[in-house]
């Protein structure tokens, strides 16, 4: 067994438990890990500004709500008054003193004492694919490498959760999701296209007995054996492991987590009988059963045309799903250990275009966090009176992602080498927003 671990001398001749874990992970994952305690100045130089901050986790789970297309900050979390850029959108009071959000989110307004609004996000990526990629990974797109999403980083560093269900689930139909990036395929999310359909093909085919099924699987394993010996690559092994995991999941009682018909009609209707609302309900059911990272996407925010028609419609969907998710988690005692995150690839222009729409605007936009140790009822950062410029508390994308990692207790300055021997950290050089925490 060989290890891709660069280190200086270790005190004595014994490996600490941490060092042993690092080497074991390096061997099994096909990536190299470089602990900060081992790094020489030369090898650590690319990440000498990575945050050393780490804490006891305040969150065990993450429910990540992604607003695909570029959500208008001015019509959701950062509404303005008395200026032309506000358009017809009005702010309303919320359950948190001094916190105002859009009139299109009245149900969420009642939950804002649980929520921290970050109104000072800024990005360098003004195109959808590039912005989506950076928000999920903290890195710019490169043709030579694919970076992991946060759920994959958590899988690698912590794992845990339910032994028969995946740790990382994505609910939606966005083919641009970076997934596991350069990590093995086994660290990828389980993709659920339609939450109301549950999981397909997870039962034995009708007419096939258990003995026949296992005989067929044994035959397939035998036929694959020579190929796996000849090509002992990590992704070949990872796909074999995924089949094993699928077999385990097929037998799990926890598969019922994916069956939304177990929920009362009243509950399902409250979340919204649409893919996003039912995805939020599915996310709650999954974290209840030990799934640690669930992403749910809501598209339709690319409002170049008719912004003030489309945004209220989209907000109605968002409002029901988000407000009921936060309220439900709180009522079940899960909000304290579950970090709810909402973000988008960029905002929309303060200037309203000739089609009564708003265009791409990465310079200033908003996101929110709730639960998981976050102190609710606050806003962080500020844009100017027209929503054009961040004038207080600028937050880069890596900072936002570093805050998620910080809540999970992940090591922000842990360097991991990709299979091509390039070094990376979870959130690049992002600094977590520690003052958001209670």
Image (cartoon, rainbow, N blue to C red):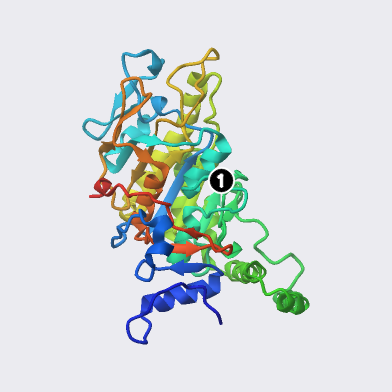
Packing grade of label 1 (10 A; few <14, some 14-19, many >=20) is some
The foreground one among 403 and 16 is 16
Is 403 rendered above or below residue 237?
Answer: above
Which residue shows up at 52% across the image and 45% down it?
140
Across and down, in percent, residue 5 comes to: 47, 73
Residue 290 appears anywhere in the view = no
The foreground one among 16 and 377 is 16
Which residue shows up at 50% across the image and 36% down it?
125
Q: Secondary structure at mark 1?
A: loop
Residue 54 sits in which quadrant? bottom left
Q: Is residue 294 left or right of residue 111?
A: right
Q: Which residue is mark 1?
A: 141
Residue 13 appears anywhere in the view = yes
Which residue shows up at 33% across the image and 51% down it?
335
**Quadrant into which the N terminus falls:** bottom right
Residue 15 sits in which quadrant? bottom left
Is 188 rendered above or below residue 351?
Answer: below
Across and down, in percent, residue 343 comes to: 43, 40
The foreground one among 351 and 418 is 418
Across and down, in percent, residue 294 comes to: 48, 52
Residue 395 sits in which quadrant? top left
Across and down, in percent, residue 184 comes to: 58, 64
The foreground one among 359 and 243 is 359
């Amino acid at each position: 067994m060989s290890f891709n671990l660069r280190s200086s001398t270790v005190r004595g001749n014994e490996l600490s438990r941490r060092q042993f874990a690092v080497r074991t992970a390096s061997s099994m994952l096909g990536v190299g890990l470089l602990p900060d305690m081992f790094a020489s100045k030369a090898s650590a130089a690319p990440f000498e500004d990575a945050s050393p901050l780490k804490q006891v986790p305040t969150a065990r789970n993450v429910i990540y709500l992604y607003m695909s297309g570029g959500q208008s900050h001015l019509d959701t979390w950062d509404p303005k008054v008395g200026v032309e850029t506000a358009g017809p959108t009005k702010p309303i009071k919320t359950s948190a003193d001094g916190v105002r959000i859009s009139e299109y989110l009245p149900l969420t307004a009642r939950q804002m004492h649980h929520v921290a609004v970050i109104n000072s996000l800024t990005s360098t990526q003004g195109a959808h694919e590039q912005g989506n990629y950076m928000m999920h990974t903290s890195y710019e797109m490169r043709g030579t490498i694919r970076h992991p999403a946060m759920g994959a980083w958590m899988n690698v560093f912590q794992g845990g959760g339910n032994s028969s269900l995946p740790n990382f689930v994505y609910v939606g139909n966005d083919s641009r999701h970076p997934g596991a990036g350069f990590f093995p395929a086994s660290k990828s999310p389980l993709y659920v296209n339609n939450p109301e359909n549950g999981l397909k093909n997870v039962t034995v085919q009708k007419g096939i007995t258990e003995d026949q099924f296992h005989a067929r699987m044994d035959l397939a394993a035998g036929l694959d054996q020579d190929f796996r010996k000849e090509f002992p690559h990590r992704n070949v092994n990872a796909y074999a492991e995924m089949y094993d995991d699928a077999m385990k999941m097929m037998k799990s009682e926890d598969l019922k987590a994916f069956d939304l018909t177990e929920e009362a009609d009243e509950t399902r209707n409250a979340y919204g009988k649409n893919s996003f609302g039912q995805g939020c309900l599915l996310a709650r059911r999954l974290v209840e059963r030990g799934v640690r990272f669930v992403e749910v996407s809501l598209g339709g925010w690319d409002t170049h045309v008719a912004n003030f028609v489309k945004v209220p419609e989209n907000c109605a969907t968002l409002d029901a799903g988000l407000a009921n998710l936060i309220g439900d988690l709180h009522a079940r005692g899960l909000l304290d250990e579950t970090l709810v995150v909402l973000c988008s690839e960029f905002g929309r222009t303060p200037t309203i275009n000739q089609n009564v729409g708003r265009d791409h605007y990465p310079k200033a936009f908003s996101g929110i966090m709730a639960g998981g140790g976050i102190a609710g009822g606050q806003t962080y950062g500020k844009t100017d009176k027209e929503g054009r410029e961040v004038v207080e508390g600028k937050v880069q994308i890596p900072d936002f992602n570093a805050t998620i990692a910080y809540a999970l207790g992940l090591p922000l300055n842990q360097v991991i080498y990709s299979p091509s021997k390039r070094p990376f950290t979870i959130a690049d050089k992002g600094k977590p927003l520690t003052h958001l925490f209670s």
